[in-house]
Amino acid sequence: MRNEPGGGAIPTYELTGLRAPKNQKFLSPSSRHLLWAGLQAVEHSGWRRETLTPDRTAVFAASGQAGLEPSFIFPGFKVAQDAQGVADWAAIGGPPSRLIDPYFSLRALANSGLALLAMDIGARGPTNNFVQSDTAGAQALDAAIGSLADGLCDVALCGTFESLVTPANELNYRRMGLISASGRMRPFDREADGLVLGEGGAALVLERRADAESRGAVILAGISVNDERPADFMVAAGHGVPRMDIEEATTIDPAVPCTAFKGATGYLGAATALVEVVLTIAALRRRVIPPVVGLSEPAEGIALRLVRGDAGMVPVVARCLSRSWMGERAAITVVAG
């Protein structure tokens, strides 16, 4: 990861398999990640769009930074001039307006990814989009689990997406003094100095266990939100911002092994919770507790059992922690399948 716009960017990839390829023109950079992850999740679950029952299929999503980006509108502003040839925003009408992205209003919608994914898989069951920063993914999971428990759907696709590698986000986080000068995220480390902005997406197909077993599906994990069962290890939020890491450390049981992923992924905003759940599922299936990426020496005041190598145990239950910038907190419990 590099300490510049795009430092945690995903390599370019081709989005294939869309039922309506023309819908790609409505996708923002971040909503593309949701479509890519969502279609893969459906395929890997053993379901196909043709076998899903539309009215019994739900889609829940978590999204983040939405709004106008310079790339949407600046081409028009560059040629908008008054009678003397001086740049003038009042002259944006007429020919300059034709240079403005005609789909910018759709791409800027926070729920655009949710809508396009639901349309692509033909889902007409419960849907909702959550935008509460890092805890948005936990809220989407909670809604999906609740809909399954209440019998409102039989399959729930839960996804998340965020792209912070844009000039506007870079300026915003830098103005707040949150960007790492070293270009590295070091959760709980004595050299920690802030964030490296990234982007990402993740998706999970959720079903009631009995239904998944009856169709012979491979069950990767069991998931619950804000469950208090004992965990074999914790996945801390671990932002790499010293004051936040010290505060978070006071809320975690120092006897439980603790790791953090942001040193590898960068800061993913609203995509954080579900991306870290997916990484946790992968760790549980391999029966390992991953070390804290970017950790050299713990910072003063951090009294946690931070994982730095082989934890010496086979984990079965993990808890992923997330917190928003406004103070909301959530915990997602993941049990090996």
Image (cartoon, helix red, strand yellow):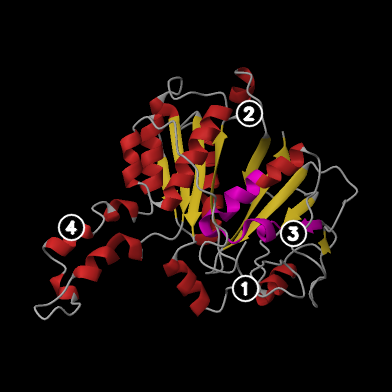
Question: Counting residues from the N terminus, which is met first, the one under dot 3 or under dot 4?
Answer: 4
**What percent of the width, then of the height, locates residue 68?**
33, 63
User: According to the image, label 1 marks what residue?
Assistant: 180
Residue type (three-letter) at the residue carrying disc 2? Arg
Residue at x 64% of width, y 47% of height: 277
What label does residue 98 carry, if any? 4
**What percent of the width, then of the height, locates residue 26?**
32, 46
Side of 84 relative to 48 (left or right): left
User: According to the image, label 3 marks what residue?
Assistant: 293
Residue type (three-letter) at the residue carrying disc 4? Arg
Q: Single out the mark in the foreground, 2 or 1.
A: 1
Residue neighbourhood size for the residue with mark 1, other residues' Cα within 10 Å, grouped as few (<14), some (14–19), many (≥20): many
User: According to the image, label 2 marks what residue?
Assistant: 209
Query: Which corner quadrant of the image does residue 302 belong to?
Result: bottom right
Residue type (three-letter) at the residue carrying disc 3? Val
**What percent of the width, then of the height, locates residue 53?**
42, 23
Q: Which element carries disc 4, helix, strand or loop?
A: helix
Query: Which corner quadrant of the image does residue 243 belong to?
Result: bottom right
Side of 223 relative to 286 (left or right): left
Q: Can the viewer see residue 123? A: no
